[in-house]
Image (cartoon, helix red, strand yellow):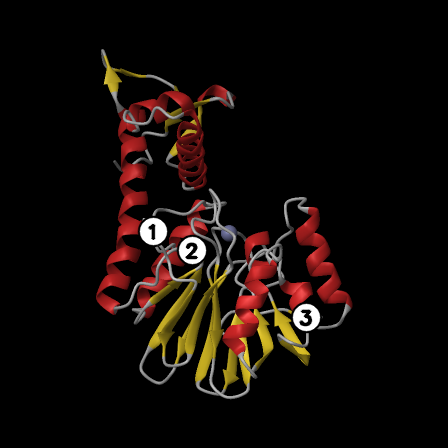
């Protein structure tokens, strides 16, 4: 994995600033983006709020400029955790700075997230984001793209400086590897939606920026075809016949069949989670069923299946 620069000029009016929170789920840390020209800038995502070094880096990157709007891609702590500290720090934000986050979804019982959002809401400075909402600023136009799936509230943002939309992807698409998904059917729809944008670049929440339309499209198509391949494999396993009969399969058995190379127990758990997401999507589409009402076993609903 190449080491990411902590600060990178992505385009004329976009600066990527790494939130300095590396970890197993954040790769080298969360990318945050300062957008715009002139003295008032927009910040997309805020890191997890635990690293004073990141806030210092942000101050240094801003110089005499200040953030007057903060856009949040989704509720995960590594994207919104820095919000309250920033809103109360006039060396980073203007006193009238406003924050925007889509209001869908709870926060899965995560207290620090709930507290951070409640504090911003109480100050009257946290606002909803609608799909396609535009944010005008000096040097760019930002537009929200509702992209649920990674989480229920997920928003990506196009940033257009006049030469085509670049896409800030949040955790919909990462700069390397694959992302974790809450709900697969809307996630696949979200990938199709951003593919339709034909973005000029992908600015991910984690990992390196992807710099051309050709590479951006290749990455999005790769995400789609990888998930579709797994779905075909699951349907093929469930449709397999032994002596003319199909059997019912557990998630664990399907997983070991289609991920034979995986032996690390943590990776097996992640793979089983993926298989479960696919089965839930296929169940909703009427292609699979639970065997005889048994929660643990799955069968093909053969009449509806299209392998
Ligand atoms: Zn996330």
Residue at mark 2: 206
- Point out residue 191 in the picture as x, y percentages from the top left corner: 37, 57
Residue at mark 3: 87
Is the distance from the Cβ of mark 1 to the nearest ligand 1 atom less than 8 Å?
Answer: no
In which quadrant will I find the C terminus? top left
Label 1: few (<14), some (14–19) or many (≥20) C-alpha neighbours in 10 Å: some
Q: Is residue 304 above or below residue 22?
A: above
- Point out residue 91 in the picture as x, y percentages from the top left corner: 64, 76
Q: Is residue 26 above or below residue 170?
A: above
Which badge, 2 or 3, comes first in the chain's sequence? 3
Residue at mark 1: 176
- Point out residue 179 in the picture as x, y percentages from the top left corner: 41, 47
Left or right, 192 with respect to 128, comes to left
- Point out residue 137 in the picture as x, y percentages from the top left corner: 51, 85
Q: How many marks?
A: 3
The residue at the far right in this view is 122
Q: Is residue 47 above or below residue 180?
A: below
Q: Is residue 76 visible?
A: no
């Amino acid at each position: 994995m190449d080491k990411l620069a902590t600060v990178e000029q992505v385009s004329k009016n976009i600066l990527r600033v790494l939130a300095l929170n590396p970890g197993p789920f954040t790769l080298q840390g969360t990318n945050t983006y300062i957008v715009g020209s002139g003295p008032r800038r927009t910040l997309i995502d805020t890191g997890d709020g635990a690293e004073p070094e990141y806030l210092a880096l942000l101050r240094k990157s801003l110089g005499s400029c200040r953030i007057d709007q903060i856009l949040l891609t989704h509720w995960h702590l590594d994207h919104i955790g820095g919000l309250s500290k920033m809103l109360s720090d006039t060396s980073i934000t203007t006193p009238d700075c406003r924050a925007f986050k889509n209001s869908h979804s709870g926060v899965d019982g995560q207290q620090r997230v709930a507290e951070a959002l409640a504090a911003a809401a109480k100050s009257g400075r946290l606002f909803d984001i609608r799909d396609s909402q535009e944010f005008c600023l000096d040097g760019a136009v930002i537009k929200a793209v509702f992209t649920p799936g990674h989480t229920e509230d997920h928003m990506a943002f196009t940033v257009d400086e006049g030469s085509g939309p670049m896409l800030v992807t949040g955790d919909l698409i990462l700069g390397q590897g694959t992302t974790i998904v809450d709900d697969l059917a809307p996630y696949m729809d979200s990938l199709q939606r951003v593919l339709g944008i034909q973005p000029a670049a992908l600015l991910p929440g984690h990992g390196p920026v992807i710099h051309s339309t050709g590479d951006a499209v290749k990455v999005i198509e790769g995400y789609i075809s990888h998930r579709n391949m797994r779905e075909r494999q699951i349907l093929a396993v469930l449709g397999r016949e032994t002596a003319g009969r199909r059997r019912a399969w557990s998630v664990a058995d399907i997983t070991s069949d289609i991920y034979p190379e995986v032996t690390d127990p943590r990776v097996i758990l992640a793979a089983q989670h993926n298989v479960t997401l696919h089965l839930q999507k296929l169940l909703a589409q009427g292609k699979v069923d639970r065997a005889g009402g048994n929660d643990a076993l799955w069968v093909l609903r053969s009449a509806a299946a299209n392998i």
